[in-house]
Amino acid sequence: MKKLLLAAAGAALVAAPATAAVTVLTFEGIGNLNPVGAFYAPDYIFSPATLAIVDADAGGSGNFANEPSPNTIMFFLDANNAILDVPAGFTTGFSFWYTSSVAASVTVYDGPGATGNVLATLNLVAQAFGCPGDPTGAFACWSPVGVTFSGTAFSIDFGGTANQTGFDNITFGSANPRVPEPGVWAMLIAGFGLVGHAARRRRTALAA
């Protein structure tokens, strides 16, 4: 198996709730090879095999370049466990940027856990290599994809993308993936840092 991205992590949430406005998950701030899991909970919950990875040029282990958001992206370790649940649901559109060494597909469902009716399918092509980028980053070509659909979606299956596909700027409420303004990054990351600090304090208190 080709050595994947090993570079993606962090997150930034822009606007909420998902059903009311455009929301962007950038994965900035999660940390290199840390699980995404409930980082965006309760609005967005990723399956356990979902990891964030930081670009090697930013001190991480990611083999990628030209990522839409500063240094972190997301990837899956298990193609059979690559699900994103959105408990409140989302409408109108869904989009993201991706880099991939294999062809794959992403499916939007109207039920939780990749169940129910298929609302939309996005087909991904292999296009990762051959673009100029930073000094270390073979996965350097990124493509935007998106789709509009009718109804309310509650989950997304990223199956078939294990360890060979990276995702960034997952966008809800629009068929065109967004890139937050540079001035917004520090505020977003600081906000998530405070949330993480509060969660750690709660866990420490419970342990005591």
Image (cartoon, rainbow, N blue to C red):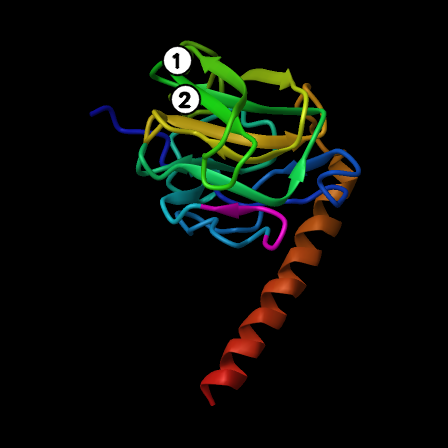
Query: Which residue is most to the left?
Result: 1
Rendered location of residue 59, percent (x, y): 44, 45
Q: Is residue 55 magenta?
A: no
Please name the residue that numbered disc 2 is placed on.
139
Specify the principal SS of the magenta part. loop
Disc 2 crowd, CA 10 A, few/some/many (<14, 14-19, 20+): many
Looking at the image, residue 145 lies above or below residue 35 = above
Q: Nearer the viewer, residue 71 or 176?
A: 176
Comes first in the chain, label 1 or label 2: 1
CB under 8 Å between discs 1 and 2: yes
Q: Which residues are magenta?
A: 41-46
Q: Nearer the viewer, residue 200 or 80?
A: 80
Residue at the (57%, 77%) spot, across then down:
201
What's the residue type where badge 1 is placed? Phe
Magenta residue check for 45: yes
Q: Is residue 127 left or right of residue 10?
A: left
